[in-house]
Image (spheres, grey):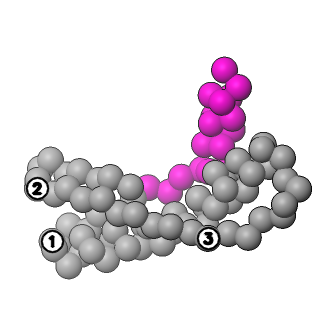
Amino acid sequence: MNFNDESKNSHGILVVTGQFDLEDNLTEDQLHIFLGQNGAAILYPYVRSILSMITALDDNRVKILPTLNFVNLAKNNKIKREQ
């Protein structure tokens, strides 16, 4: 996750890794759904929380990432993969 705040010249990279156990017999579409949709939805609240805590330590203007609809993002990614 890259974030930039040009008004304060704040730049950073936050890397969060998740480890998931999946069934061996999943199709490629199922893998994309589980990882791209569910995996991202599981990890994203931690990303939001970490970023908010870090920026709160640096400034009184806490940065809060918006909520995301991972179902729609997964659908859009599927459409792009099929093109």
Q: Tell me whether circle 2 and circle 1 mark residues in contact (CB < 8 Å).
A: yes
Residue marked by disc 2: 8
Determine the main secondary structure of the stretch shown in magenta: helix
Q: Earlier in the sequence, mark 3 or mark 1?
A: 3
Residue 23 on the magenta segment:
no
The kind of residue on which mark 2 rests is: Lys
The disc at residue 59 is 1
Q: Earlier in the sequence, mark 2 or mark 3?
A: 2
Residue marked by disc 3: 19
Vertical relation: 20 (above or below) 26: below
Q: Secondary structure at mark 3?
A: loop
The residue at 70%/47% (across/down) is: 32
Q: Residues within 10 Å of mark 1 (few under 14, many from 20)?
A: few
Vertical relation: 53 (above or below) 38: below
Q: Position of residue 17 (x, y in %)?
A: 50, 67
The residue at 57%/69% (across/down) is: 18
Answer yes or no: is residue 63 visible: yes
The residue at 63%/34% (across/down) is: 76
Nearer mark to the viewer, of 2 and 3: 3
Residue 74 on the magenta segment:
yes
Q: Position of residue 43 (x, y in %)?
A: 55, 67
Segment tinted magenta in the rendering: 66-83
The kind of residue on which mark 1 rests is: Asp
Answer yes or no: is residue 72 visible: no
Nearer mark to the viewer, of 3 and 1: 3
Gap between marks 2 and 3 measured at Cα: 34 Å
Gap between marks 2 and 1 measured at Cα: 10 Å
Q: Position of residue 74 (x, y in %)?
A: 65, 43
Count of marks overlaid on the render:
3
Q: Secondary structure at mark 1?
A: loop
The kind of residue on which mark 3 rests is: Gln
